[in-house]
Image (spheres, grey):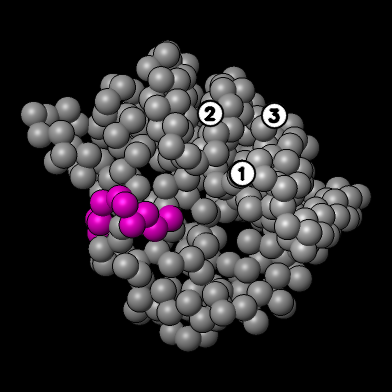
Amino acid sequence: MSNRPLPLARRIRFHAEALGFDMLAGLVRLLGPDRASALSGALWRRIAPLNKRHARAGAQMRMAFPDLDEATIARQLDAMWDNLGRTMAESFHIAALVKDRARFEIDEDTRLAVEKARAGGAVFVSLHQGNWELAAPLLDSLGLPVAGIYQKLQNPFTERKAAAFRTPFYALGLHSKGHDTARTILKLVAGGGTVTIMADLRDLTGIAVPFFGQMAPSTAFPALVARMRGVPLFAGAVLRESGATFRVRSVEIPVPHSADRDADIRAIVAAIQAQFESFIREAPAQWMWGHRRWQK
């Protein structure tokens, strides 16, 4: 943000939002991870369908799963809001959740991915499914220092408070999107570091590849980093099992190195999105259907 003073009205609004954030954080932490998760999920199931994103989520789910009947769609959307509500509350309990290893079933492919990354760096991509907030902290808990990329909040006061919950799990830094971020990440991976990137959102500057039968503009940055630096690329998901318990999955994505660099990048992007689609088909109610994924 600019160093210029904020207008008074905006400053008052930002402080009010930050106060609300503190009150929410205090309540959620007081409840503990399990009660907070359950209560937030129940509240979101009641309130979130009133938002315009509910209609968009339903339309996109129907497009992706044309064989589902309306009753099934309604149940899936209800479960989606429950998952998102739980994820919001659990984001205030990341340290406690990650510390309790009994909450996680971590597959062998994830452990092998961590070992490969330790040997010389890697790129991990994930999607807004299950509790995605736990993905990087879990890698950190398994002994793999990681960097992350995120979008800063407009409110600088809330931004600092929200970042405080995440930064302890990013030993190599939590980097906000900006002009120098790509250069920073490329340098970090060249030095043997590992970066985690959320790669399922629409990116109009990216590459359009198939996703549930429709062309979807998708980020090429993870593919570019993995190919340029010659490191392995993994797609992972933290799927919700029951309440605040999870199943962790990882799949290695091939990184071709042919004479046609552009074709290689496109193939990697397509493979990432194909794996994301596979994860979503496994647990469709746990993906965030409300964002604009396909719209140009």
Q: Quadrant of the N terminus?
A: top right
State whether residue 58 is above or below residue 197: below
Crowd band around label 1 with a 10 angstrom C-alpha radius: few (<14), some (14–19), many (20+): few
Choose mark 1 or mark 3, whichever is in front: 1
State how far apart marks 3 and 2 are (Cα): 11 Å
Q: Is 250 placed left or right of 1 in the picture? A: left
Q: For the residue labelled by badge 1, is the local secondary structure a helix, a strand or a loop?
A: loop
Asked if the stretch drawn in magenta spans residue 157, the answer is no
Q: Which residues are magenta?
A: 201-210
Where residue 276 appears, as percent x and y from the top left, is 39, 51
Crowd band around label 2 with a 10 angstrom C-alpha radius: few (<14), some (14–19), many (20+): many
Which quarter of the figure has residue 2? top right
Quickly name the residue at label 3. Answer: 168
Crowd band around label 3 with a 10 angstrom C-alpha radius: few (<14), some (14–19), many (20+): some
Q: Which mark is residue 147?
A: 2
User: Sequence order check: which comes first, mark 3 or mark 2?
Assistant: 2
In the rendered structure, which amino acid carries the disc numbered 2?
Ala
Choose mark 2 or mark 1, whichever is in front: 1
Q: Is 165 placed left or right of 220 in the picture? A: right
Q: Which residue shows up at 37% across the image and 54% down it? A: 203
